[in-house]
């Protein structure tokens, strides 16, 4: 068996070997080794971290309760929608027979129509933020998914009122950048949808949904299921846009077919304006005065 002949290392050799050890990935502290933390075996740890970080930060900022606002990221502000429509109309005027440009104008007109819900989300957030953030402990703080569209509108309403608001961003195949109106120290980035959804509802005292697509429906039905099954205490669920939601989801039909109880139909309230939405939330909690805050 070959054995290394004992010999004394020179000081510079020792330093070089120690430097090599310090540079090795194994020598990194576990919580500083991002490659290690990214392993499949560490998923449980990552889940715990995504639960703890926002929880501790929100607690430090004395945020006791929240209002969650969902809605499409594709809904534009009225200003942006009108600019797009004008550009499309000008292009069509130059080539009036172009079928593609006609479709673009039709799409832009729809964007202008739906920009109403950007404005209502913005007004709702401003109305609520002015009314609720007066003391040391913050109540009814606006929380959104942190992206564009309706999410931006809700964060913007709080920002324009001088109030704090929260953004729960998510990493997607096409990166979703945070909108500029979120309170910077209250903007979080998630990897796991499950933990993000948990944080949406942990402090929520109302859920507000403007017109939206798969993501909005996912969050809406998850909340309805949690309330229906008693996993979440009752809270007001407000849907902005009666025509949109009645055409999209026939709650009465579900009850008529025995798929839900008639009481479950009452879990949602459809409204048209920011004032109607805020009034329903206030009346709900006045009626449920003895109810505990959100989990």
Image (cartoon, rainbow, N blue to C red):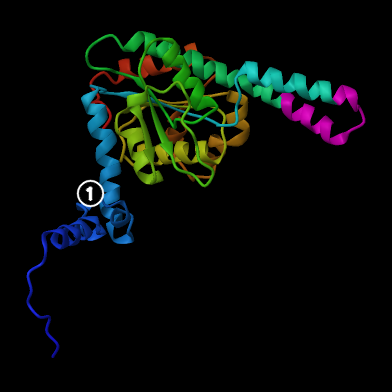
Magenta span of residues: 92-109
Q: Which secondary structure, mark 1? A: helix
Q: State left or right for residue 136 relative to residue 210.
A: left
Q: State left or right for residue 34 relative to residue 157.
A: left
Name the outermost residue toward the bottom.
1
Q: Is residue 5 above or below residue 38?
A: below
Q: Is residue 248 visible?
A: yes
Give coordinates of residue 208: x percent, y percent. 45, 26
Q: Nearer the viewer, residue 18 or 176?
A: 18
Residue 103 colored in magenta in the image = yes
Residue 126 colored in magenta in the image = no
Give coordinates of residue 54: x percent, y percent. 29, 34
Q: Nearer the viewer, residue 2 or 195?
A: 2
Q: Residues within 10 Å of mark 1 (few under 14, many from 20)?
A: few
Give coordinates of residue 126: x percent, y percent. 44, 12
Q: Is residue 279 visible?
A: no
Which quarter of the picture shows residue 263?
top left
Q: Is residue 34 above or below residue 141?
A: below
Residue placed at 69% from the left, 17% from the top? 82
Q: Name the residue beneath numbered marker 1.
A: 31
Q: State left or right for residue 290 relative to residue 194.
A: left
Q: Is residue 123 above or below residue 190?
A: above
Main secondary-structure element of the magenta-colored stretch: helix
Q: Nearer the viewer, residue 275 or 30?
A: 30
Q: Quadrant of the C terminus?
A: top left
Give coordinates of residue 46: x percent, y percent. 29, 49
Count of numbered marks = 1
Residue placed at 31% from the left, 12% from the top? 133
Residue placed at 70% from the left, 18% from the top? 83
């Amino acid at each position: 068996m070959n054995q290394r002949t004992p010999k004394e290392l020179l000081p510079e050799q020792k330093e070089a070997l120690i430097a090599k050890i310090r540079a090795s990935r194994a020598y990194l502290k576990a919580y500083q080794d991002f490659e290690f933390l990214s392993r499949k075996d560490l998923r449980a740890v990552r889940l715990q971290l995504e639960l703890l970080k926002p929880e501790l930060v929100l607690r430090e900022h004395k945020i006791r309760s929240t209002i969650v606002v969902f809605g499409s990221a594709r809904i534009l502000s009225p200003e942006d929608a009108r600019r797009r429509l004008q550009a499309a109309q000008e292009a069509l005027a130059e080539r009036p027979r172009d079928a593609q440009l006609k479709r673009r104008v039709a799409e832009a007109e729809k964007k202008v129509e739906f920009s109403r819900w950007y404005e209502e989300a913005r007004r709702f957030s401003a109305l609520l933020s002015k009314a609720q953030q007066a003391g040391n402990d913050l109540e009814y703080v606006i929380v959104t998914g942190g992206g564009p569209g309706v999410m931006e509108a809700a964060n913007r309403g709080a920002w324009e009122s001088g109030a704090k608001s929260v953004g729960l961003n998510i990493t997607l195949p096409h990166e979703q950048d945070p909108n500029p109106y979120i309170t910077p120290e209250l903007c979080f980035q998630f990897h796991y949808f499950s933990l993000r959804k948990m944080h949406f509802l942990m402090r929520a005292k109302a859920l507000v949904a403007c017109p939206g697509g798969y993501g909005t429906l996912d969050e809406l039905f998850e909340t309805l299921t949690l309330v229906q099954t008693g996993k979440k205490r009752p809270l007001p669920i407000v849907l902005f846009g009666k025509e949109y939601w009645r055409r999209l989801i026939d709650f009465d039909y579900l009850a008529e077919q025995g798929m839900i109880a008639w009481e479950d139909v009452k879990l949602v309230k459809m409204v048209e304006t920011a004032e109607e939405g805020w009034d329903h939330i206030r009346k709900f909690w006045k009626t449920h005065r003895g109810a505990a805050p959100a989990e």
